[in-house]
Amino acid sequence: MTGRGQARRVMVVDDDEEIVEMTRLILESGGYQVTRALSGEEALKSVSSAHPDLILLDINMPGMDGWEILKMLKVDEETQGIPVAMFSIKFELRDKVHGLKEGAFDYITKPFSYDELLERVDRIFHRLSESGGH
């Protein structure tokens, strides 16, 4: 295996099962281990046992949206150190800035290509390793 993946764990949180499945297949082909959650509630329940190294978090979901989930992750001592990349069809600059101000580590817009997703996730882990983070 190249430097990609190295058995890093990524949790994909999105209410669209097709997007979750496509994202899982792409990430697993890059050597990542993937946990999936189809709602914010499911993500919050399983994050402790999944121990993800990164969470890809959709914004527009029924029930709890991504912004609420991000806030809950950032105030919980157990999860506040997990980097979160917002994962959304919203592509306006104000949405990206809002995500970063709320504590997101990155912002990935959908739709994305196979190569783009792997490159963005690789870069997140590269930046984290350079900063001594997660």
Image (spheres, rainbow, N blue to C red):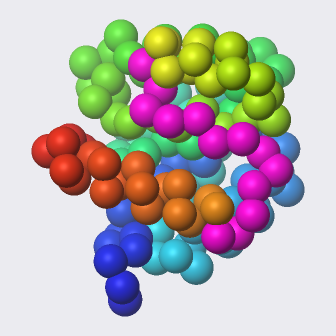
Residue 100 in view of the camera:
yes
Q: Quadrant of residue 62?
A: top right
* Residue at the image point whose x is 19% and y is 50% from the top: 130
Q: Quadrant of residue 24?
A: bottom right
> For this rendering, which residue is in front, 106 or 63?
106
Q: Is residue 105 left or right of residue 131?
A: right
Q: Is 64 contained in the magenta span?
A: no
> For this rendering, which residue is in front, 29 or 36?
29
* Residue at the image point whose x is 81% and y is 35% from the top: 89
Q: Is residue 79 above or below residue 51?
A: above
Q: Which residues are magenta?
A: 103-115
Across and down, in percent, residue 66 comes to 65, 22
Q: Residue furthest left?
A: 132
> For this rendering, which residue is in front, 11 or 1?
1
Q: Quadrant of residue 134?
A: top left
Residue 61 in view of the camera:
no
Across and down, in percent, residue 53 comes to 36, 49
Q: Is residue 41 above or below residue 74?
A: below
Q: Is residue 58 above or below residue 101?
A: below
Across and down, in percent, residue 76 comes to 33, 15
Q: Residue furthest front?
A: 93
Across and down, in percent, residue 107 comes to 59, 35
* Residue at the image point whose x is 85% and y is 56% from the top: 18
Q: Residue furthest bottom?
A: 1
Number of numbered markers: 0
* Residue at the image point whose x is 28% and y is 30% from the top: 81
Instruction: Quarter of the image for the N terminus: give it.
Output: bottom left
Q: Is residue 7 left or right of residue 64?
A: left
Q: Is residue 36 left or right of residue 14?
A: left
